[in-house]
Image (cartoon, helix red, strand yellow):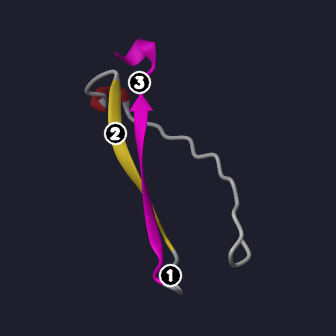
Amino acid sequence: PVEPDRLKMLKVFVRQPADQIRGAAQTFTFRVEDKSSFEADEYTATFNAPEIAR
């Protein structure tokens, strides 16, 4: 939990099955929601496939 009006840094590791990799890079969106205040924000990120999977 994070106190109100405070920030917390998180590291998020994203995996994708090798048979679903469609190219060297693929964009996706993180969506974070506060269920009590209904605040939400989105961040668009890029998944960079490892050399072996390309």
The residues bearing labels 3 and 1 have C-alpha atoms spaced at a distance of: 33 Å
- Verify whether residue 49 appears in magenta: yes
What is the quadrant of residue 53 in the picture?
A: top left
Q: Which comes sooner in the sequence, label 3 or label 1? A: 1
Query: Does dot 3 land on a helix, a strand or a loop?
Result: loop
Q: Which comes sooner in the sequence, label 3 or label 2? A: 2
Specify the amino acid type for callout 3.
Answer: Ala
The residues bearing labels 3 and 2 have C-alpha atoms spaced at a distance of: 11 Å
Which sits in the foreground, 45 or 1? Answer: 45
Q: Residue at x 34, y 16 (%)?
A: 54
x then y, percent, for residue 48? 42, 27
Residues drawn in magenta = 38-54
Q: Residue at x 45, y 19 (%)?
A: 50
Q: Which mark is residue 5?
A: none
Residue linked to disc 2: 27
Which residue extends farthest bottom? 36
